[in-house]
Amino acid sequence: MSVVLPAARSSAEARLCVELHPCGCGETQFEPQVEVVALADGDLVTRYQGSCAGCGTAREFLLRLPAEPVRPSAGAAFSYGGPEPSRLIDPGEWLAVADQYAALVPADLATAGPAGADPAQRRRATAALSRAIAALDEALKFIPADADEVPPDAITSEVGRRMRRREPGRFRRDRLTALRDTYTALLPGDDANQG
């Protein structure tokens, strides 16, 4: 039986949610058929349905569609959602996503900046950094205005809890902002001013 998850704020967030939930066999590769369907209550959901690439198990995710489409913030190169925190992905998972995208940027580009790279390498580095920045922005949304860090109860995933135990300081506003600023500074020219 399928479980209907809360509304994804964007198709990028919905797809990431699917990618973050591997099959029971541990396989993360999953190329689903995607369609919009109506539930009995009239709400619309996006259905991600297909077979696990590892073991062939049928997999299905139903993610409610937002009442209104979410547009990226003005100047943002990439965005996963609106101003509210995600209801699908917790702050620890967002940090893990930021780490994964940042790791895609070759060390020589990270130290010299993507501006000197060949155009294809520059585009890949810019896309990875933009997604890492967007993931950090998502983690920051969990910090209340009057707080300095992500509240412990906002971390609901095993990935997040493990990260919090190992490096609790990673969830502080100043650390998240400093990392975001570092990634933003690595963006070439016009992209450095976005986000």
Image (tube, rainbow, N blue to C red):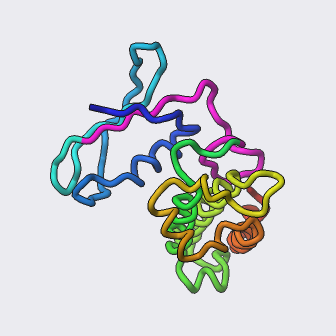
Q: Which residues are magenta?
A: 59-83
| Residue at 23% across, 50% down | 52
Q: Position of residue 78 (x, y in %)?
A: 63, 52
| Residue at 22% across, 57% down | 25
Q: Is residue 78 magenta?
A: yes
Q: Position of residue 11 (x, y in %)?
A: 51, 40
Q: Position of residue 63 (x, y in %)?
A: 45, 34
| Front one among 4 and 127 | 4
Query: In this rendering, would 92 be left or right of 42?
Result: right
Q: Is residue 55 magenta?
A: no
Q: Does residue 173 lie above or below 110 as drawn? A: above
Main SS category, magenta section:
loop
| Front one among 4 and 48 | 4
| Front one among 17 and 195 | 17
Residue 176 lies in quadrant: bottom right
Residue extending furthest front?
153
| Residue at 50% across, 34% down | 6
